[in-house]
Structures are given as structure tokens and as C-alpha cells.
Image: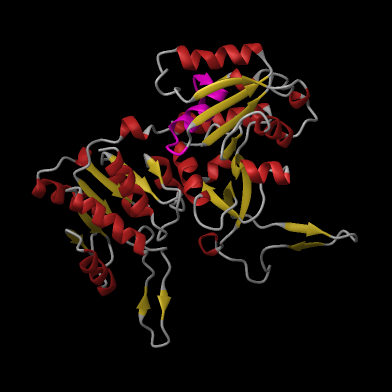
């Protein structure tokens, strides 16, 4: 059995009772509990609190009009010792693990309301892979870091000042965002740590780096949530009859590779091929719409047996409208995956707009679903599974 463990306490000093203060119209703890309850891999959600007021709010989730959504939720107590300012999160986790039987646990921090169930699903899929003992959520940061030595001299730690990389070419580095951690009960009790053994990461959107510790964090996160409200995949995905995607940056990683002879090369992902096959089996029309007109894309489309291939498109939206009209399909019944400015107008009009996690910010801002993967790493497969699951 997989469980979610969300420890919340009433003793917050920087933001009094922050766990039940309204964030975007709901108590802060609502958002992470909702994400946990919507995760298909989680069997039970346990929220441990020492505060009667927090407990009362949590019980309104169970007894309110959204009771079906919160059917996995269990509200439990925690010791006073585990809820002090100095107590570690591991202390609360171990207290829970010694009292309850389960196989695996995901620790979720209530101060990360931007967490979505899709990231938790991705985390458990990774956790269930062979030779994986723990999983944690991270954010990719593309900032240049420095260190100062004892003499006060500064030097860069992750780049060369004489060869400053462009942002799009800079791989950046991974930073914990504190949203969630997955481990087994056996490993937790043995190591007394949330992470151990062979560890893998789930990359979350850049905005999720912001945790709520200070009043200024609250203002920033609430503004982000108002700008991009959480997307409920169970309710908001329309009936999809056509599945279209850009090529470079979606089907590929956007890189341009060349052989010694100067031949252009691209890297595609085999998982996306199975994603297209699943869509075709479900009776959904598939297609690639790209501004490029290169032989590589045509060969890949032929191998995947794609229904539609539109290349050299100067106006992608007009192209998509013509395709939709030809097949008698409304734009609201189209899923489109894009990653760059040329895809923006399409994504603003189709029923289900999606993008890789490394798409440019304007695209991420309009996307109804942001994949947990970078372009070329199985984005099409992930979105295809979501579309089919929600038909």
C-alpha cells in the first residue's frame, strides 16, 4: 500500500495558522491534499496535525461537497514533541511509520501548493522502476553560482567566465523544491531518513521552486496560482478527436546534431512511437505540424504511421484550422503540443494545449497541461496516456 504523509502544525510564527489561511480561495493545506488524493498511485492520504482548528478544517474536506475527491483522506494526530519548532520532519515521519503499516510513503509538504497530481504520478512511476530506492522533486535552475574563498576572492562554480553559455544552451542544475519525497517504510525505519539508496528525481516547473515560509512568499505563490489555476485533468480535458504536435522541441530535444560528413541528425524517443500507436488504436487522428521542411521529419512520420504531416508551415494556426475543417473536427476537440512562439496562437485556441516542461515561458503560461518531461524525452507518450485515460 502506498500512502501520502502530510505533517501540518499550528505553531507557525512567520505566518500564523498558515496551513489553513486562504490561498487562492482555499485553505493552504487543501491544495496538497487535493494533489495527493488525485494521484492514482496513492491509496490513502494521512494528514497529521496537533491543532484542533486545523483538524476541523480538514474534516470539512471529508464532509463537504467535494467529499468524493477527498475519500482517501485520513486526519490523524501527532505528538507535541513532533510539532515543536526544533523537531525534524524525519521525527514526524518515523513516529507515523512506527504506528501504521504501509509499503511506501510519499512525504508531501503543505507549503508547496503548486504541486499537482501528475508530478506525484511521475514520482511513483520512477519509484517503481528497478534499482530505485527513493525519489524527490526538484526544479532546474539556470543561474550562475559563485563561491568566495578565505581571501575574499570570488570564482564561478558552474561556468567559465570566458565562455559564458547562453541560457538555452546551459543545462543548469537541480535544486530541491521541497514538494515531495518518496521512500519505502523499510528504508525509512532502517536509515531514519527520507532519502536513501539509489535516488531519482522528478523535475517540476520552475515556478514550483517557491515554498511558503515568509509573507512575501505567500504573495508570490498566490499570484502564480491566480495566473495559472490548477488544472483538474479529470474535469477539464475535452473529448479529443485529433492529436497534433510540433516536431522540434516536442518530438525531439530541440538539439541540432551533425555527423562528420555534415549530415543533420535528430534524436527521437521510442516511447513517443508507442504513444502514437495507442492514440491510433483509440481512434484518434494523429499529426505533426511543423515550420521545418526536412527529410528527417518525413521519415520519422512515415515510420510512426502518422495520419497527418504538415511541413514548412508559415502560419500554423491557419494550417490547423484547415486540417480541422477537412476532418470535420472542432478546435475544442484537438490536443496540441507545442514548445515555442510559433505554437502560441494554436495553443490559445485548441481544447487541450500541452507543452514539455522545458518549453519557453509564454508557452507554459497558456498550456493547460505541462508535461513532467523535457522535449524529446517521452512527452507525447505522457500526454497520450492522459488523453486516453480521460476519454
Vertical placement of 312 versus 111: above or below?
Answer: below
Any part of residue 9 in sight: yes
Vertical placement of 84 versus 299: above or below?
Answer: above
Predominant SS of the magenta segment: helix
Q: Please identify the residue farthest to the right as the structure is shown.
A: 151
> Residue 197: percent from the left, percent from the top?
65, 54
Quarter-of-image position of residue 335: top left
Q: Is residue 31 left or right of residue 262?
A: right
Q: Please identify the residue farthest to the front as the structure is shown.
A: 101
How is the protein colored in the picture?
A: secondary structure
Residue at figure coordinates x 43%, y 68% from the top left: 255
Residue at figure coordinates x 48%, y 28% from the top left: 34
Q: Quadrant of the C terminus?
A: top left
Q: Depth check: 143 or 334 in front?
A: 334
Vertical placement of 121 versus 270: above or below?
Answer: above
Q: Depth check: 294 or 54 in front?
A: 54
Residue range of the region highlighted in magenta in the rendering: 24-41
Is residue 22 in the magenta section? no
> Residue 304: percent from the left, percent from the top?
24, 64
Q: Is residue 162 left or right of residue 298?
A: right
Any part of residue 339 in sight: no
Is residue 33 in the magenta section? yes
> Residue 66: percent from the left, percent from the top?
41, 18
Q: Is residue 40 left or right of residue 46?
A: left
Quarter-of-image position of residue 90: top right
Vertical placement of 343 versus 70: above or below?
Answer: below
Quarter-of-image position of residue 266: bottom left
Residue at figure coordinates x 45%, y 32% from the top left: 227
- Number of marks in the image? 0
> Residue 387: percent from the left, percent from the top?
29, 43
Q: Please identify the residue farthest to the bottom as the structure is shown.
A: 261
Amino acid at each position: 500500500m502506498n500512502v501520502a504523509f502530510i505533517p501540518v502544525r499550528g505553531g507557525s510564527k512567520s505566518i500564523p495558522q498558515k496551513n489553513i489561511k486562504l490561498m487562492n480561495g482555499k485553505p493552504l493545506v487543501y491544495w496538497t491534499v487535493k494533489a495527493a488524493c488525485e494521484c492514482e498511485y496513492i491509496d490513502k492520504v494521512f494528514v497529521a496535525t496537533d491543532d484542533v482548528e486545523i483538524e476541523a478544517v480538514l474534516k470539512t474536506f471529508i464532509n463537504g461537497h467535494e467529499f468524493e475527491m477527498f475519500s482517501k483522506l485520513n486526519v490523524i494526530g501527532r505528538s507535541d514533541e513532533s510539532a515543536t519548532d526544533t523537531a525534524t520532519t524525519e521525527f514526524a515521519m518515523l513516529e507515523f511509520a512506527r504506528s501504521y503499516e504501509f509499503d511506501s510513503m510519499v512525504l508531501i509538504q503543505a507549503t508547496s501548493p503548486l504541486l499537482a497530481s501528475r508530478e506525484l504520478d511521475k514520482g511513483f512511476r520512477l519509484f517503481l522502476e528497478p534499482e530505485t530506492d527513493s525519489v524527490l522533486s526538484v526544479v532546474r535552475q539556470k543561474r550562475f553560482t559563485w563561491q568566495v574563498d578565505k581571501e575574499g576572492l570570488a570564482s564561478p562554480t558552474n561556468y567559465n567566465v570566458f565562455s559564458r553559455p547562453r541560457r538555452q544552451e546551459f543545462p543548469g542544475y537541480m535544486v530541491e523544491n521541497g514538494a515531495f519525497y518518496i521512500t519505502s517504510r523499510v528504508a525509512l525505519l532502517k536509515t531514519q531518513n527520507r532519502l536513501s539508496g539509489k535516488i531519482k528525481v522528478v523535475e517540476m516547473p520552475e515556478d514550483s521552486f517557491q515554498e511558503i515560509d515568509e509573507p512575501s512568499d505567500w504573495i508570490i505563490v498566490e499570484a502564480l496560482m491566480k495566473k495559472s489555476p490548477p488544472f483538474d485533468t479529470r474535469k477539464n480535458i475535452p473529448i479529443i478527436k485529433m492529436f497534433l504536435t510540433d516536431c522540434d522541441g516536442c518530438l525531439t530535444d530541440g538539439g541540432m546534431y551533425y555527423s562528420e560528413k555534415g549530415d543533420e541528425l535528430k534524436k527521437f524517443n521510442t516511447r513517443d512511437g508507442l504513444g502514437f500507436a495507442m492514440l491510433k488504436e483509440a481512434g484518434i487522428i494523429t499529426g505533426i505540424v511543423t515550420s521545418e521542411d526536412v527529410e528527417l521529419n518525413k521519415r520519422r512520420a512515415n515510420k510512426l504511421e502518422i495520419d497527418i504531416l504538415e511541413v514548412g508551415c508559415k502560419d500554423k494556426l491557419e494550417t490547423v484550422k484547415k486540417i480541422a475543417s477537412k476532418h470535420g473536427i472542432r478546435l475544442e476537440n484537438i490536443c496540441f503540443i507545442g514548445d515555442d512562439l510559433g505554437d502560441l496562437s494554436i495553443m490559445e485556441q485548441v481544447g487541450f494545449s500541452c507543452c514539455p516542461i522545458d518549453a519557453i515561458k509564454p508557452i507554459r503560461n497558456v498550456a493547460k497541461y505541462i508535461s513532467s518531461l523535457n522535449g524529446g524525452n517521452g512527452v507525447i507518450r505522457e500526454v497520450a496516456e492522459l488523453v486516453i485515460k480521460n476519454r
